[in-house]
Amino acid sequence: MSLERARNLVQLFNDGDYDEDIEPYFNTLINFFKFLKKYEVLDEININDIPSSELDKDVFDFLMENNLITSSDYDNLPNEFKNYYLSYGLEHDYESTVIYITSNLLTDVEIRPDGFYLHLRDREELADFFCSSSRNTSASDIAKIIFGEDSHEWYYDGYTKPSEVIGVLDDSNITRLKDVIYKQIGYKELSLEDLNSDFFEFLSEDQGTEGYFRIRPEDLNGLLNDSDSMNQLFNDELSDLGSELSSLYNMSENTSYEDEISSLVYDGLSEYFDGNVTETPREVTLRDGTKKTRYRVRYIKIRDFVGDVKTFLSDTAGSGYNDSILEYHGSYTSLIKDNDSLFECIDFRIPDYPDYTQITKNVNEYFTDYI
């Protein structure tokens, strides 16, 4: 065959006639390309006219070896070649390739000296990395609340009797509670008509009074150990103190549950991220002309950005579907969220109740703030 014949074949190929007029004579596309290379016309082919059935790794490698792709713009490559191209670039021209990916394909990622950072629209975007499900409340739902700015009451178990709170107080707070009770009702005449229990009857008899009794310092231990007597006082003479103790316990429950939930969420983030969200202060001008500093969530460091990209490229290499190329997703967040077969969403078991040990700790820690 002559050079003229080779050029005619190039024209047929570029006109889309490979399957009918070329493939029967050369059997494989690479054999055809080797023939064109022999006559030095290989660089005249239009790689976008390669039949989709021939867009495989062997053909890509041949074109790369012969410098037919390196001079091509990524945007003009067939979809089937794009992931091969990026994988090759990460292997042989790492710095330029990651810059291209973060500047053009996954544009919510910033390269810094110590790694890759996800630029967040807002903190709640992180909830996209958590599992959604048909459950009443999913890990994603919980994460949205944690990362949101609104306050939330996590746990409420109804009214807690103040006498039950006494049972979790440590010695120091028991002493403080005795002092408070004694200051409020110590040696005050208390009517048996209004307050009637075996303990109060005993005090009346022991003190030789009729129809009333007094709380003396030596009576406080017995009083605190008698839940019936204490609950009566908390509904009467010590109603404000009883309300404070009940509020203290309920707040301790809620804080305990919130702390546990928050730990589950932030521990889960470590699957994809390293460290905490960083915030950058900015000054804004209000309508009245005054300036105010506000904080906007900005970045969080991605644990293995390049590894995640390589996983995606490897799994979808050779596919011509739009969702198989990086620019379809446009962001690291969408890349992870849209490909749940490759990247597991973050999940955890939502506790039914707050941890009792932590509740007890909170009650004693916050006691002096309430009482």
Image (tube, rainbow, N blue to C red):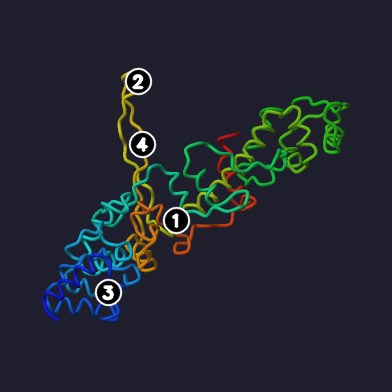
Amino acid type of the residue that numbered disc 1 sits on in the rendered structure? Asp
Q: Which residue corresponds to mark 1?
A: 338
Query: Residue 55's spot in the image, x, y percent?
Result: 31, 70
Image point 76% across, 36% down: which residue? 231
Cα gap from disc 4 to disc 2, whole angstroms: 18 Å
Q: Are marks 3 and 2 in contact (CB under 8 Å)?
A: no
Residue 158 in picture, x, y percent from top left:
70, 39
Residue 97, x across and y down, in percent: 23, 61
Q: Secondary structure at mark 1?
A: helix
Q: Going from the N terminus, do you reach mark 2 or mark 1 first?
A: 2
CA separation in Å, label 4 and label 1: 30 Å
Q: List the residue tagged with mark 4.
A: 295
Rounded to the nearest whole Å, what is the CA distance between mark 3 and mark 2?
72 Å
Whichever of labels 4 and 2 marks the residue nearer the N terminus, that label is 2
Type of the residue with mark 4: Tyr
Q: Which mark is residue 21?
A: 3
Residue found at x 29% / y 81%? 27
Q: The disc labelled 3 sits on which kind of residue? A: Asp
Does dot 2 land on a helix, a strand or a loop?
loop
